[in-house]
Image (spheres, grey):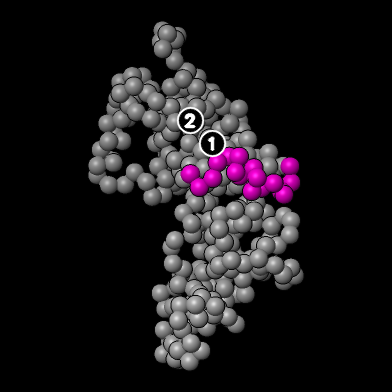
Amino acid sequence: MRDTGVVTWGELIAHGETQASVRRAVADETLVRLRRGWYARSDADARVVEAVRRGGVLSCVSALRYRGIWVPGRSDDVHARAGTSRDRTGRFCSQHGRPESVTGPVDEIPIALRHAARCLDAEGLVVVCDSIVNRKHFTPDDLASILGDTPVAVRALLGRCDGSAQSGTESMVRLRLRARNIPVRTQVVIPRVGIVDMVVGDRLIIETDGERYHSGLERYTEDRRRDREAARLGYITLRLTYADVVELWERTEEIILEIVRRRRHRWPRHNQHR
């Protein structure tokens, strides 16, 4: 498990430290006292330090992002929870149902997800659940159990999840197009091309290049080979960047809608045997 660099007094003692050695470590700044019973090494994760110093632990979308889950929105906000005590300050995230005890400086995925269910909008929660399933942390049935105490409307969102999605941007495009009743197939195998993120209608391929994906000369070259092969077979390919989906969606959506309105996403009549 990834080391956060934040430890409790009990953990220090269990690893052989004494009250005197902890005091010396604080004095020479190899340890920083965050609050009563909690300490951080000089290499500790800054997000975890802030959450603990604030009086809680890293949770909600921040804990999910920390654990490698694709989370939409800003990454610089720190989400924390206060533990079993009820928060009346508004500084902490909360979950549906009773608060849970703290087991470490960063919440595990189930607790973090239950808190994120109150912070994320519907699209954001589906995107996160797609990522959790895709990374094989939990199955859809597991997620239904984890979110068992959430309102019916929240649990119903699990029916829109697709764990085959390779990135959050892919999930976002799928959800937005289906919300407009545009037919979308995901992770489609096309001979001589390979697996593509989405196919709209018959022949409009949409590839979503996530923020950290499709970089490097080798990947770039292979993507262009696939695009050429798809064109030879009669497909139209739209390759969307992270910014196209997250920051410029209105413009991007209009391009897709124009292709659909002109029925260019369907095979011409002479190709309907495909």
Q: Tag 2: residue type?
A: Thr
Residue pictured at 39% horizontal, 25% vertical: 189
Question: Horizontal and vertical percent for residue 227?
Answer: 32, 30
* Residue 273 vs residue 61, the one in the foreground: 61
Report if residue 168 is visible in the image. Answer: no
Name the quarter where the C terminus is drawn. top left
Numbered disc 2: secondary structure: strand
In screen coordinates, is 246 left or right of 113?
left
Magenta residues, start to end: 136-152
Give the mark, 1 or 2, whose residue is nearer the N terminus. 1
Q: How many angstroms separate mark 1 from mark 2 (CA)?
A: 9 Å
Name the disc covering residue 162, or none: 1
Question: Horizontal and vertical percent for residue 232?
Answer: 30, 20
Please tell me whether residue 17 belongs to the stretch shown in magenta.
no
Does residue 29 lie above or below 232 as drawn? below
Q: Which residue is labeled 2 in the image?
A: 186
